[in-house]
Image (cartoon, rainbow, N blue to C red):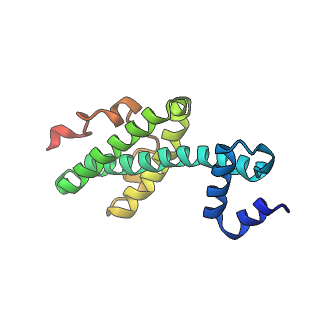
Amino acid sequence: MNQSSNLYELDFYAWTQQQAEFLQQKKWNCLDVPNLVEEIESLGKQQRQELRNRLGILLAHLLKWEFQPSYRSKSWLATIREQRRQVLRLLKENPSLQPYLAEAMEDAYQSGLNLAVTETPLDYDDFPEECSYSFDQVLDSQFFPGQSES
């Protein structure tokens, strides 16, 4: 194990600073390539996870909005607005996530469904098994399911 790999195990932050310095100084032979590759791949996975998480929270609140109209609140509205804003920001900053959207929506819907069931007195049978909103609807600032019930 070289000195960089050892630092990676002992002090991750110090390792990141050291690797950045090696990159800036073009000290290619000093780089901890195996751990750098692992961390770069992990960063990409984190972006996908953030997209799924934000969509899951957004979908949960859209479900709650639709299926519990008498409980609609400014808090739910604020959460819907913020999650939409964050998903749009994430996609703007990471346009290569676009091909992943269909899969992300499927995964996120299941998470959102779990959250909606946890946060309401409703059961799984009270909600659709699959997402009934399109991705465009989910991100449309004017879309609120069941809005006519307000």
The image shows residue 122 at horizontal and vertical percentages of 34, 59
Q: How far across and how far down the image is residue 58, in percent? A: 36, 47
Q: Is residue 5 left or right of residue 25?
A: right
Looking at the rendered structure, the number of numbered marks drawn on it comes to 0
Residue in view at x 43 percent, y 52 percent = 113
Whether residue 73 is visible, yes or no, is no
Q: Position of residue 81 (x, y in %)?
A: 27, 44
Q: Residue furthest left?
A: 150
What residue is rendered at 34% in x and 35% in y? 139
Q: Is residue 61 visible?
A: yes
Front-most of residues 77 and 86? 86
Q: Residue furthest front?
A: 25
> Please, is residue 133 above or below residue 127 in the view?
above
- Which residue of the protein is positioned furthest toward the bottom in this rendering? 10
Measuring from the top left, give residue 55's x and y in whole percent.
42, 45
Q: Is residue 103 above or below residue 114?
A: above
**Quadrant of residue 1 within the rendered picture:** bottom right
